[in-house]
Image (cartoon, rainbow, N blue to C red):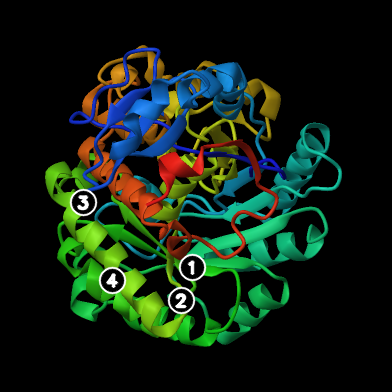
């Protein structure tokens, strides 16, 4: 979903937060990230950064020093971040082949009634939608790249025969993925998905059945959700291209380090420890308070690092890795939530089971964000609709406190859906401002200690070009 060749700036980008809020000026600004030997220096306009020894601060301002060198290239950096924020074309679709789900998870962003009795997309309509998408992407993407279709939900395996037909028919046209609660993932289905190189995302919220079932519930009776995911993980062990999403709530936030141990022991290659999105009122009831989220999250990252050092095997926490990439190489990001505008309606869009088009899955169920219908209108019309423009024109430079925050282009004040629904508008912050600030502080400490690579995918910097290299005397520990 990102350009094939990414560029990295060997320095720092923008620091975010209400407490390191020093990004209003046009010059480089020192920001103490709590590190004994270094300061972070940032220009929030361009997402440029560098870590500087405190003992070398004077060298910044000397003739020919860092500030002078940076100013010569600052316009290029500003253009690069502007292109990342406003110049992307979609390359992926979150495709809901059904509205229905067999679970009634507390925090789901799709309304309960929709999940209980919504529509299945027919095979004919799914093929028609994929044909329209194929034609659309043929006009917007290079011929040597294939767009991604992620079957999403609701629970896509509730309509799997139709999904299976689509994958078989269009296997040469798209790269497919699927996100599932695993309760319907039998051996035959799993063999089909792996034999067709479909990436698989599983959802699991706790290291024990008791914790998992606090939020991942069924509509009636009791489904073995926890055991189903464990079975899927065991069967996928050693397979590339699968991951586990952990939705972090009040019910499991204190178990994140245990969860990391649990997943690492089972050789899961990557996971996401995602704070619950607060788009719908029910999800806010289990939301972790912003001021309490960072400590257990960072403790889990530390535990993952200790396990890596012990075993030589990584469990990449992908949402934190994306924050590191936002700093180290902005255009190499793999996720597009942590930037403004976010990826919704720009890097990807969402398709509901009746063909309605939304900027992102988070907006399914919010009628004001329906941009059109793939069967009765064009994708191009949806992309320029008022519904999509509300999301794609959200700009953290234009509202406070984000507009004067030093890390606004590492964070992006996500998520626009929860900002709009929870805080009252697109010109408001999201739900986890302080949480993002502490993530960025921690990321800078890792960079200063030369540990950042331990938290990233192996080979993350293949094809990354360094366009500005800060003097060794200023940056090394």
The local secondary structure at tag 3 comes to helix
Q: Quadrant of residue 166?
A: bottom right
How far apart are labels 4 and 3 at the CA level?
A: 14 Å
- The answer to whether residue 89 is seen in the rendering is yes
- The answer to whether residue 105 is seen in the rendering is no
Sequence-wise first label, 2 or 3: 2
Q: Residues within 10 Å of mark 3 (few under 14, many from 20)?
A: many
Of tags 2 and 3, the one toward the viewer is: 3
Q: Residue at x 60, y 52 (%)?
A: 121
Q: Quadrant of residue 253?
A: bottom left
How far apart are labels 2 and 1 at the CA level?
A: 7 Å
Q: Report how many numbered discs are placed on residues in the image.
A: 4
Sequence-wise first label, 4 or 3: 3
Sequence-wise first label, 2 or 1: 1
**Residue 362: x, y in percent?**
41, 40
Residue 450 relative to residue 385: left or right: left
Sequence-wise first label, 1 or 3: 1
How far apart are labels 2 and 3 at the CA level?
A: 23 Å
Residue at mark 3: 294
In terms of depth relative to the viewer, which is nearer, 100 or 434?
434
Is 29 situated above or below 5?
A: above
Sequence-wise first label, 4 or 1: 1
How far apart are labels 2 and 4 at the CA level?
A: 15 Å
**Which disc is residue 303 wearing?**
4
State yes or no: discs 2 and 3 in contact (Cβ < 8 Å): no
Residue at mark 2: 268
**Which disc is residue 243 wearing?**
1
Q: Residues within 10 Å of mark 2 (few under 14, many from 20)?
A: many
How far apart are labels 4 and 1 at the CA level?
A: 18 Å
Of tags 4 and 3, the one toward the viewer is: 4
**Residue 5: x, y in percent?**
71, 43
Q: Residue at x 31, y 22 (%)?
A: 402
């Amino acid at each position: 979903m990102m350009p094939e060749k990414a560029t990295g700036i060997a320095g720092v980008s923008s620091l975010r937060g209400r407490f390191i809020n020093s990004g209003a000026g046009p010059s480089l600004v020192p920001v103490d990230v709590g590190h004994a030997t270094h300061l972070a220096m940032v220009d929030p306009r361009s997402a440029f950064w560098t870590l500087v020894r405190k003992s070398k601060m004077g060298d910044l301002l000397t003739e020919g020093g860092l500030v002078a060198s940076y100013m010569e290239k600052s316009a290029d950096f500003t253009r690069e971040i502007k292109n990342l924020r406003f110049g992307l074309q979609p390359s992926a679709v979150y495709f809901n082949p059904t509205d229905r789900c067999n679970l009634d998870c507390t925090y789901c962003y799709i309304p309960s009634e929709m999940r209980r009795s919504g529509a299945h997309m027919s095979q004919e309509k799914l093929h028609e939608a994929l044909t329209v998408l194929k034609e659309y992407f043929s006009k917007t993407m290079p011929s040597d790249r294939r767009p991604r279709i992620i079957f999403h939900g609701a629970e896509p395996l509730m309509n799997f025969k139709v999904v299976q037909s689509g994958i078989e028919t269009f296997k040469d046209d798209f790269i497919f993925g699927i996100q599932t609660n695993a309760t319907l993932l039998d051996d035959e289905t799993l063999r089909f998905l792996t034999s067709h190189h479909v990436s698989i995302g599983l959802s699991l919220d706790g290291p024990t059945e008791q914790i998992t079932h606090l939020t991942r519930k069924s509509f009636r009776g009791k489904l073995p959700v926890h055991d189903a995911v464990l079975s899927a993980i065991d069967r996928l062990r050693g397979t590339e291209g699968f991951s586990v999403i952990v939705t972090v709530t009040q019910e499991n936030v204190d178990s994140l380090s245990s969860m990391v141990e649990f997943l690492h022991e089972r050789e899961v290659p990557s996971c996401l420890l995602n704070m619950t999105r607060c788009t719908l009122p029910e999800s806010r009831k289990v939301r972790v308070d912003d001021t309490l989220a960072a400590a257990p999250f960072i403790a889990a990252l530390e535990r993952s690092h200790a396990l890596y050092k012990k075993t030589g095997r990584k469990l990449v926490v992908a949402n934190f890795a994306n924050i590191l990439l936002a700093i180290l190489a902005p255009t190499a990001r793999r996720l597009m939530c942590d930037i403004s505008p976010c990826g919704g309606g720009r890097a990807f869009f969402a398709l509901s089971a009746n063909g309605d088009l939304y900027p992102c899955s988070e907006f399914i169920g919010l009628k004001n964000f329906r941009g059109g219908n793939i069967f009765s209108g064009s994708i191009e019309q949806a992309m320029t609709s008022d519904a999509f423009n509300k999301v794609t024109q959200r700009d953290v430079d234009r509202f406070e406190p984000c507009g004067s925050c030093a890390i606004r282009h590492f964070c992006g004040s996500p998520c626009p859906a929860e900002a709009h629904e929870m805080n009252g508008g697109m010109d408001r912050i999201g739900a986890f401002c302080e949480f993002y600030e502490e993530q960025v502080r921690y990321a800078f400490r890792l960079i200063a200690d030369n540990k950042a690579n331990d938290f990233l995918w192996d080979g993350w910097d293949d094809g990354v070009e360094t366009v500005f290299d800060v003097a060794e005397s200023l940056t090394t520990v």
